[in-house]
Image: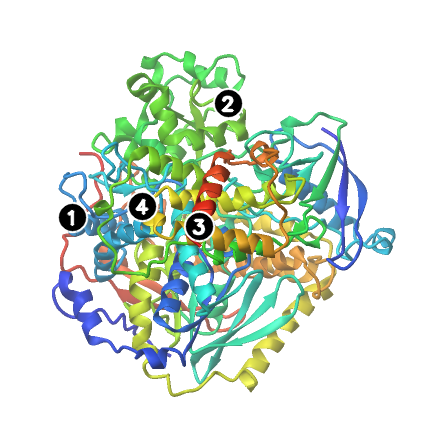
Amino acid sequence: MASTLNSKIPEGPLAEKWSKHKAGIRVVTPGNKRKLDIIVIGTGLGGASAAASLGELGYNVKVFCISDSPRRAHSIAAQGGINAAKNYQNDNDSVYRLFYETIKGGDYRSREANVYRLAEVSNNIIDQCVAQGVPFAREYGGLLANRSFGGATVSRTFYARGQTGQQLLLGAYAALNRQVAAGTVKSYPRHEMLDVVLVNGEAKGIIARNLVTGAIERFGAHAVVIASGGYGNTYFLSTNAMNSNGSAAWQCYKKGAFFANPCFAQIHPTCIPVHGEQQSKLTLMSESLRNDGRIWVPKKLEDVEKLRKHEIKPSQIPEEDRDYYLERRYPAFGNLVPRDVASRAAKERCDAGFGVNETGLAVFLDFKTAIDRLGEDKIRERYGNLFQMYEKITAVNPYKEPMMIYPAIHYTMGGLWVDYNLQTTVPGLYAIGEANFSDHGGNRLGASALMQGLADGYFILPYTIGDYLAGHFKDGPVNTQTPEFEAAEKAVKDKIEKLFSIKGKRTVDSIHKELGHIMWEYVGMARNEEGLKEGIKLIQALKKEFWSNVFVPGSNFEFNQELEKALRLADFLEIGELMARDALNRRESCGGHFREESQTEDGETKRDDENYMYVAAWEYKGEDVEPELTKEPLVYENIKIATRNYKD
Amino acid sequence: MDLTLKVWRQKNAKTKGHFETYQVKNISEGSSFLEMLDILNEQLVQEGIDPVAVEKGCQSSGPVSFDHDCREGICGACSLYINGRAHGPDDEVTTCQLHMRKFKDGDTITIEPWRSAGFPVIKDLVVDRGAFDKILQAGGFISVRTGGVPDANAIPIAKEKADESMDAAACIGCGACVATCKNGSAMLFVAARVSSLALLPQGKIEGARRAKAMVAKMDELGFGNCTNTRACEMECPKHITVSHIARLNREFLCAKFQD
């Protein structure tokens, strides 16, 4: 197949690329849009905004989600905010600055043209959301307020308390509801895509399972959009929702779409620490808390011991005995360094024995200084819901004692490879939001996921998809009674039957937990050659164990959550292996990917721009065959490549 | 701690349900309520099919079905009626944020699905809340298209109004208000959306039409009337108050006068 990837980045100066590209691509006339069907998988910020916008344009849209309502997609849980280059603070922000900081934050592993476009449309997103009635935080004068986020030199984050993702999603969901009422969008809740169907190499539909009845159904369309989020749940414990999964994207990979940079997974520094073996998921505490919270551990090991034995409270440790290690190591950015840097610094302190809870895997996030300066009311206004959530989970009042936090898997920068049009290597198959790889490089900055999801869905895909569909309005409706649909449906049914037939001894969750332990140990915050090879072996063995010893109770023709989980785990086992392979291939440290062999003297990441300044795109070659790597070189024409420096 | 669980089991919407009794042991008090149910389900999967339970109408597949997703109290998926209270004995939390330290060793806990004409049972503790989507589709939006909107700061909004709008917009659509109301009314849910938009200049324009359309749809879908018992407000995990119902009523009356 294609040995070189065509990213279709337009010619011309950076700031003009998107305008020129839009002017040059084809448009489908209103009358012909009605003849075209589009399937959208997922209803988070990307999926909901895309489905609504495409419906408004006049296409026939079918939108699928696995929850009981589109509103429950996991974008809802994003807390802190959304970035935009509005420069409302007069602090010298600009499209260029947002672009530059996003590229730098991603450790120079994302595409210039894509990121510039993202920064360019960021301002439209805020306008759109306000028009939809999103109640962003405001100043007393009635204008919009901003807060600061990690890796940024200016204050450009818009927010709605600690529920920004919820409010933006409710805005997109409302736009979607309006189109459902108008009849341009048909919504299929509690439906899970189990395969994509290709006809003559182009995406023409999907096979989905009705999660209530178990019926396997065929849906045809002229284009398919994957907006199903990331694959962070490969680690079992993550901040993702329990049902978040990588399966839709993975089926696309197995049908020929390239998968890019799978090893780039973000570990978020501020999550509530693991309480024990019964833990099912990890809860995030928003990055916005680092605006006012200071991160520390004790300087003295004897204080650590006393804390672990509950002999003293953290508030009793005097100021001079505290090590505010981020402020110490990174004076320029302090507590607001990017997530990957903050996570590794926490691990470094805990590895050195300074972890503050019984497991030794926790550091403090302390608001005392901010409360002294601003008063408890101000802090409550900014973070009230987060403080309440923390107290409900841990039974500790964070107004009195510092929070305990530890890094956890949060977001995956890797995903389906897409060109500038957000099209995968399969014609007619698109990927948006977290499901694609395009904008965040090796590390995503805080408040940029919401920005990307909505940019793709509202302002990019609705333009670029027309260029492809303009060649298809004469095709007529897609016929699902063809050998290709037949074969895809049969493969799905066979897979489900196989799962029931194993009748082994292990529960789905027990295998998933084991996978999570392998991933965290060998493909986690610090990786090395030997460990990755070992990890691959263990994952392969676990995959065999799964396919020979899992027990899936019940039957297909009912609401069956164990079957849902088993189907997703089958894919996580393969995703985990590809992540490890990609991490093994990338013998450099960059962003969230830390190879122990490649670090500076003071333990910072050391990139290898000469050999690894590329996107690693993997092509599926068959069951138990090694995937093939294609490299898309990254070319930086507009910014100077530098070592990321958050110290001075 | 060790607990006795009385769990509602129901094969599907067409069959009758019943309570089944289970024991769980060694539950840590730091675990969440749903983690406790995960442990029960691991146990039930391992025990395999219980023919007696199947005979009585349990699902064939052993584990108890329940809706859940984010486990951070924001997606609104979890929906359990625990010891006679929506989302259980703690205040201002969803079921997923209820922790086992709220219970004592040896307790018996009764777990039921939301019970309301508007929310038919799909299986065990899972109900169909599709009616909420339909109510919002009837008018729970501002009619703007993507693109072509004014600059965000061109519409100043008083901070107090924006804050109050946000209070209402915090609704997670879980349905605890309906499950708690003796009339099975969805007034608090409808009011939260109507009020959140009516407080903003952008939303004011369609305020009357929105209120009328959403209330009409709520009635059509079989939800009951509001008789001001305020039970919904007491159980709302996001502390949405009945003052929003008052605003809905004002919007609704205005709409009627305009007719």
How far apart, in angstroms, are the residues tagged by discs 4 and 2? 40 Å
Residue wearing tag 1: A94
Horizontal side of A578 relative to A589 (left or right) equals right
Secondary element under disc 2, as helix, strand or loop, is: loop
- Can the viewer see residue A537? no
Q: How many marks overall?
A: 4
Q: Closer to the camera, A315 or A343? A: A315
Q: Mark 1 falls on what kind of element? A: loop
Query: Which residue matches tag 3?
Result: B255
Counting from the top left corner in percent of width and height, residue A530 is at 45, 50
Q: Chain of mark 1?
A: A
Tag 4 secondary structure: helix
Q: CA distance from mark 1 to mark 3?
A: 45 Å
Within 10 Å of disc 2 (Cα), the crowding (few <14, some 14-19, many 20+) is: some
Q: Position of residue A59 (x, y in %)?
A: 39, 73
Q: Type of residue at label 2?
A: Val
Identity, as a three-letter code, of the amino acid under mark 4: Pro
In this rendering, the label closer to the viewer, 3 or 4: 3
- The residue tagged 4 is B201
Task: Please report, as a chain letter, where disc 4 is located.
Answer: B
Label 3: chain letter: B
Q: Can you give x and y, in whole percent of width and height, for residue B104 in the image? A: 71, 25
Q: Secondary structure at mark 3?
A: helix
Quarter of the view holding residue A45: bottom left
Cα–Cα span, label 1 and label 2: 41 Å
Between marks 1 and 3 in the image, the one whose residue lies nearer the viewer? 3
In the rendered view, tell whether residue B106 sits above or below residue B141: above
